[in-house]
Image (tube, rainbow, N blue to C red):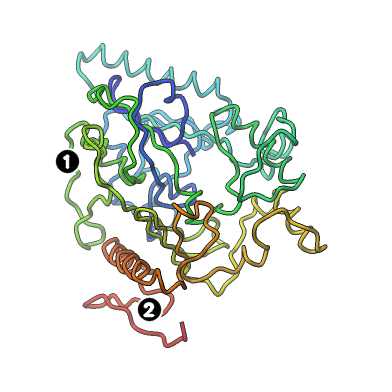
Amino acid sequence: NVVSVRVNLLGLLVCCDVGECRRRNVLLIIGQVCVCVCVCVCVCIYTFYFSTNSNATLLSLPPFFMRKGIIGKKHVGSGPVYPFDFAYTEETSSVLQVGWNITKIKLLVRKFFQSQKAERSETEEERPFFLYVAFHDPHRCGHSQPQYGVFCEKFGNGENQVKVLYFIPGTPAARADIAAQYTTVSRLDQGYIFYTIHSNDLKMKLWEPMLVSSPEHQQCWEQLSQAYISLLDITPTTLDCFSLLYPSYSLSGGRSVGLSGRSLLPALISEPSWVTVYASQSLHEVTMFYPMRSIHQGPYWLLHNMHYRMPFPIDQDFYMSPAFQDLLNRTQSGQPTGWFKTLNEYYSRERWELFDIQSDPTERRNLAGDPAYAPVLESLRDQLLKWQWQTEDPWVCEPDAVLETKLKPQCRLLYNGL
C-alpha cells in the first residue's frame, strides 16, 4: 500500500513509495514497515493484541486534525478509533473506482482540497487536516474481480520483456504473472510481486524508500539519508510538525501508552545516527498464523521464526497465483523451478536467520549457525528480546516458554525441547 500523510496546504508530505512525490525535491530516507500485512501496515498493531480492530480507547492520528479524509482501501478499524468525515472507500463505493481508477482518485483528492480551501476561507484561520490515500494497486484481484484479470490489468507488457528478479523463479508462468502486475504498476510508479517474502520479515519485503518533503527544510531537498526509519515514525513526525503533544493515557488500566516511533524532522536538519529498526509479523490471513520478529542493525538482519517447526503457511491469493501454481506443478513433476530454493526450503525455515545484507544482499546464507558470528547473533537476540518486553509483546517467551503476566511478568519454561 502507498501511505501518504498530507497535513496543511503547505505542510509535511510523507510517502512510503516513489510516486507523485518524485517530481518534487525531497529527502529520500531508507524506510521500513513495522509489519508485513496490509491492515497492520496501516495501523501498526505490531503485537496483534487487538486483532484487526484496535482497542476502542486507542488514540489514533486522525482525531488530532480538524478535518479527516480517506480515499481508497481502508483496511483499518474500528470506526470510532479511526474517524473520517470525508470517506470514499470499499465500504461506501466500488473499490474498482476508489481503489483502482486513478482519474477518480485524483478528482476525489481535488474535491477534498477544494472543500478544505473553502472552509479555510470562511474561517480565515489555518485548520490542519489529514488525508490518507491508499491505492489498491498492485494487489491481486483475480479472486474478487476475475473478469478483469489477475491484477485487474487492462493490458500486458510482454512476458519476455520483463526482468525476473532473483527471488522469483525464471519460468514462463512467473514472467506472465509479473507482466500482469507490471500493468498495475503503470497506474502507479513501481513495484513487483515479492515472491519469496510475501508476508515475511525479510529485507525485500520491509525495505522501501521513504520520501519526506518539508517546505520548512529546503536545505535538505535532493539529499539522500541512510538513516533507518519505520512507519511507526509517521505519527510522531506529524505531531512534531504541528507542535502537538501525544496525550498521556492508558489502555484497560495498564501502563501509560507511548509512541514507539520518533520524529523524522531532525533528519531534515542533519544526518542522524539511526541504524536500528524492528519489525513483526503474526499472520496475513487468520488461517496462516506464523509469528516472526526481527531486528535490522547496520548490515545485519536477524529474524526469529517462532513456529519454525511448522510449514510456512500460504494465503489464498498467493496460492492461486500463476507463479505459485507453476512452482507446485514443477516441483511435483520434478522439473527445474528456476528458483534458488526448493519448495521444501520455502516451507521449512530455521528458527534463527541471520544475514549480512552488505555481503549477501539476496539473503541466501544463514549465518546464525556460524561460530564466527556468535557475538553478533547474541547481541541482536538480546536487543530483540528487550524490544519485545518494551512493547509488551505477548509472544516474548515463544516458543520455549509461556508468558505469565500475574504480579511480575515472566517466562515460565515449557521444557518442550526447543
Q: Is residue 43 rendered to the left or right of residue 155?
A: left
Question: Which is more toward the observer, 137 or 110?
Answer: 137
Residue 382, by quadrant, is bottom left
Q: Amino acid at mark 2?
A: Val
* Residue 365 drawn above or below residue 247: below
Residue 377, numbered label: none
Q: Is residue 2 rendered to the left or right of residue 179?
A: left
- Residue pushed farthest right? 333
* Residue 117 drawn above or below residue 284: above
Q: Is residue 9 rendered to the left or right of residue 347?
A: left
* Residue 235 drawn above or below residue 85: below
Question: Which is more toward the observer, 160 or 35?
Answer: 160
Q: Are marks 1 and 2 in contact (CB under 8 Å)?
A: no
Residue at image position (76%, 62%) is 331
Residue at image position (57%, 35%) is 137
Please tell me whether mark 2 sits on a helix, a strand or a loop. Answer: strand
Residue 176 location in percent, x, y?
74, 40
Q: Amino acid at mark 1?
A: Leu
- Residue pushed farthest bottom? 415
Please tell me whether mark 1 sits on a helix, a strand or a loop. Answer: loop
Q: Write down the residue under mark 1.
A: 245
Q: Write down the residue under mark 2.
A: 402
Question: Which is more toward the observer, 153 or 94?
Answer: 153
